[in-house]
Amino acid sequence: MAKARTAYVCSECGGQVARWQGQCPQCQAWNTLVETAITAAPAGGGRFAALAGETSRLRPLSSLQPREEPRQPTGLDEFDRVLGGGLVAGGVVLIGGDPGIGKSTLLLQALSHLSGTHKVVYVSGEESGEQVALRAHRLQLPPSELQMLAEINLERILQALREARPRVAVIDSIQTIYSETLQSAPGSVAQVRECAAQLTRFAKQSGTSLILVGHVTKDGTLAGPRVLEHIVDTVLYFEGDTHSSFRLIRAFKNRFGAVNELGVFAMTERGLRGVSNPSAIFLSQHAQQVAGSCVLITQEGTRPLLVEIQALVDSAQSPNPRRLSVGLEPTRLAMLLAVMHRHAGVVCYDQDVFVNAVGGVKITEPAADLAILFAIVSSLRDRPLRQGLAVFGEVGLAGEIRPAPRGQERLREAAKLGFDTAIIPRANAPRQAIEGLDVIAVDRVEEALERMRELA
């Protein structure tokens, strides 16, 4: 019989110590050690044996032949885009997001589509089968052969999955599942780590595509130990304002596709619907040109997007002017203002500066720098920018305009959406002219602002 022992486990990193301490020695977090009963594994390794006997011997890499298995589309194009083309056999996907954002709705729609051609299982640890059926009825999903299991015991779930041998399985959610081998409560660090490891092991052995739903903390990160994100193959985050009908799903880790890929959905009465032209969401429709607005050509994974950057510059009413950015890197705003003052002579030290990315999208790439500067100067001087102008480019501390990756794709997307002028870094200048698009290449911040004034 396995012998139980007590240890103190960090709720942040999952590290273990024999005695309680105020600070975790692994991650240096304070007051995160929780007493947990841990059951030792039986002699011989037990459930931690190798996946296959062949993996225990050395083999040259050249002798291993990769298996190219076709991906399984989910029926939702935007979801497939983020996954890298569809689900991979034996792959484990972890999807997290705020409560009520639409995670269960998205997965129920995908399983309903897959159930027509494959055996799929939906394991719900938070709702009863009747509640899931009520949601499917509300979404007007067609009758399907979707198998439903309302269970939170890990051993019973694994037994049911082994008997059913589904092509795709969903666990909603991993924080509600518990294993009988551990005495800690569901959702604890030990339980989440153990259940995720066992379910991942089952997926690798059986070839079942497994999707885990994860809770998030108040900071927006996935709850549980960090090792949870290391175990799985793909980590997706569902973003969006619950007061808005649009939802964004973003890949932060993907062993089988591009990271930072973005999928856009619209929440309707019949569930989530993919948005084929997401740039229309992030571009405001003004009756006339307004000051403080500039269109940025950004890149999310493999998809170029056009996003409107808005800035508001107003006289400061306090000794310390405010610098606030929403949807953009907050630490870069003060740096960009200093570069603009030093190299272009534009003064904002006595002004409050607010910058926003329209549509709730979060932009992390530095190629948004030039659009931010254009929007700030436009608001400061109360002069709208030229209609049909789109820009991108990173601004360095020396005042240089640095190139951005995939410049050709960005320019083609702008031309396709009807923009006729683009100000870009000189290193991104296309070798061949793009039909309908006048490309202006610049090297320095002062040169870029001068060309902007000429076009206004």
Image (cartoon, helix red, strand yellow):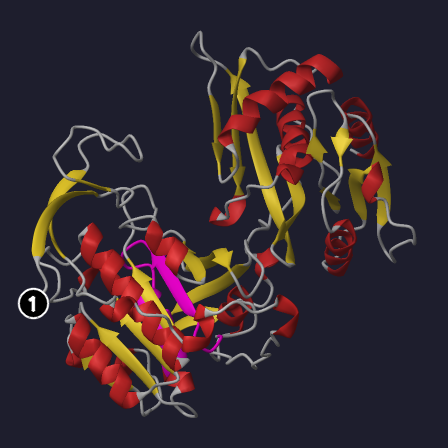
Residue 383: say if magenta: no
Quadrant assignment for the C terminus: top right
Residue 109: say if magenta: yes
The x and y percentages for residue 188 are 17, 52
The x and y percentages for residue 357 are 53, 41
Q: Residue at x 34, y 68 (%)?
A: 200
Residue 270 appearing in the image: no
Given residues 194 and 372, the one toward you in this image is 194
Given residues 17 and 12, the one toward you in this image is 17
Q: Using the image, determine if residue 187 lies above or below residue 210.
A: above
The x and y percentages for residue 386 are 75, 39
In the picture of the structure, the residue carrying the numbered disc 1 is: 1
Q: Quadrant of residue 429?
A: top right
Q: Using the image, determine if residue 26 lies above or below residue 240.
A: above
Q: Quadrant of residue 389?
A: top right
Q: Range of the magenta residues?
A: 88-111
Asked if residue 233 lies left or right of residue 374, the reply is left
Q: Residue at x 12, y 34 (%)?
A: 20
Residue furthest to the top: 319
Given residues 356 and 314, the one toward you in this image is 356
Asked if residue 220 lies left or right of residue 305, the reply is left
Q: Amino acid at mark 1?
A: Met
